[in-house]
Amino acid sequence: MKKYSIYLFVLLAFATAGCNKFLDQAPDERTTLNTPSKVSELLVTAYPRGNHVLLAESMSDIPAFVSATGIDFAVNQNGYFWKDVEAVDQDSPTYYWNACYTAIGAANQALAAIAKATDPQAYSGQKGEALVARAYSHFMLVTLFSKCYDPATAEIDPGVPYVTDPETVVFKKYDRKTVAYVYQQIEKDFLEGMPLIVDNYKVPAYHFTRKAANAFACRYYLFKKDAAKVIEYANLAFPANNFADNVRPWKSYSAFNVAQIEAAFSNAANPGNLLIAETVSRLARNYKRPVYSVNQNRLNVIIAPVGTPLNSYRIFSNSSTFYYVLKFVEHFVRTSINATTGTTYTMVPLLTTEEVLLNRAEAYIMQEKYPEALADMNTLISQRVSTYTPATQNFTEAKIKTFYAGVTTDTKQTFFNALLDLKKAEFVHEGMRWLDILRHKLPVVHADADGAEFTLKADDNRKLWQVPSEVTLSGVEQNPR
């Protein structure tokens, strides 16, 4: 792919080679973005190439201390104890922050080129993709680095800089504004962009198709607690309601070997993968056996929500100590043919059919439409049990209430618990549980190697990832501690 001069968010300069390199390229090179195909090439870079999964998973209630023989790395260690990660390399908050703003910079450069084109209507599809991609990166930033959207406080909670112009100066001043403001801008971008998207990509899963854009809208409105909109966009994503045929087909992996399962999970042809990104990440190398991860008993409980074992997941172990559901595959690119060093990549699904289905189920629970919620949850269960028998494996109201009897007697909360535990099983190792913890303001309890317990309270400021210290040079305040 041809390289273009992209004026990135100024903070990227600190994560790479400094201000001199940042200013090396001549501004006039931007005029080379003069055809729809060239703008499309640029938009390949409008998706974050950083990864938030390892840290999000480490901070959640999924891992526990397993063994000191595991892989010991800062993101897992710091994340598990909810300490700020000082590392700035791949899989760190700083790396992800910069990756998102780099993607935003590419989207903004594309939009600037389109605005200057003599025939902007010829760029309609590219404009739609750029707007939705820009909205997505800002959404992930405000989700991880700001307080979760709460209508009672969103107008005063600090957000993240919403950048809409190509970066042209060093140390440009930015304002975090508020979570409410960032949400308004996100919604404005994706509502304008979605109708413009043209689904004519060679590999649709690497781009924001209309289906993927609807899936993103579904997530956005779930965080905004707008149940009706969640259901609306879930139905737009799958108007035929054919979720069972479009989730990741775990049942078909029963005869696959390790390499085949790994390849299938993040494959662009996998119907469950609505949007996939190539990330610079050690996720595939490190998720299987961190010091703080899951043992056999813990994983067996996680993948049996409401006591229903979802036995189509393929479980493996390292040294009969660390257990995991096989998901990610590493792509290692050497710096040269004979080199032993290089860059580690992991392909990661950003939006999936399963999330859309379970987001709709959660919206139904919000509306107290419990039969509809059960139908959606049981649709997924039907595709996660190898010898599925509805009368045995399906969730029912009676089964759910009995299972959580010692936890709550509130019907709505009981259904939320079942839904969140089903999501916890489906998305184990994928960092999605952390998003649920943020949205539902759940506390998290971890224990160290000696059994001493530590609690992350529902409103703990440590839930907000720390904004990189360098951003203070651009006037952006860090999060409180």
Image: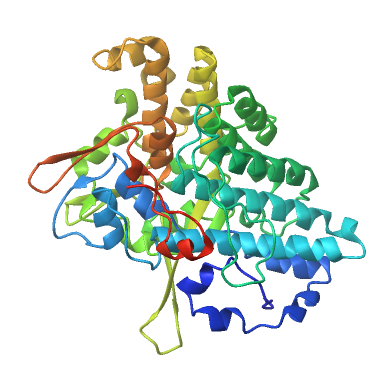
420 or 243, nearer to the observer: 420
Asked which quadrant contains residue 254, the reply is: top left
Image position of 184 (left or right of 121):
left
- In the depicted structure, whether residue 114 falls above or below residue 394: below
The location of residue 449, given as percent across then percent down, is: 11, 49
72 or 327, nearer to the observer: 72
The residue furthest left is: 450
Image position of 238 (left or right of 364):
right
Query: Which part of the image, by quadrant, shows the N terminus?
Result: bottom right
Q: Residue at x 29, y 35 (%)?
A: 302
The location of residue 19, given as percent across then percent down, is: 54, 79
Asked which quadrant contains residue 319, the reply is: bottom left
The residue furthest right is: 118
Which color scheme does this rendered protein use?
rainbow
Q: Residue at x 56, y 60 (%)?
A: 101
**Numbered marks: total:** 0
Q: Residue at x 45, y 40 (%)?
A: 147
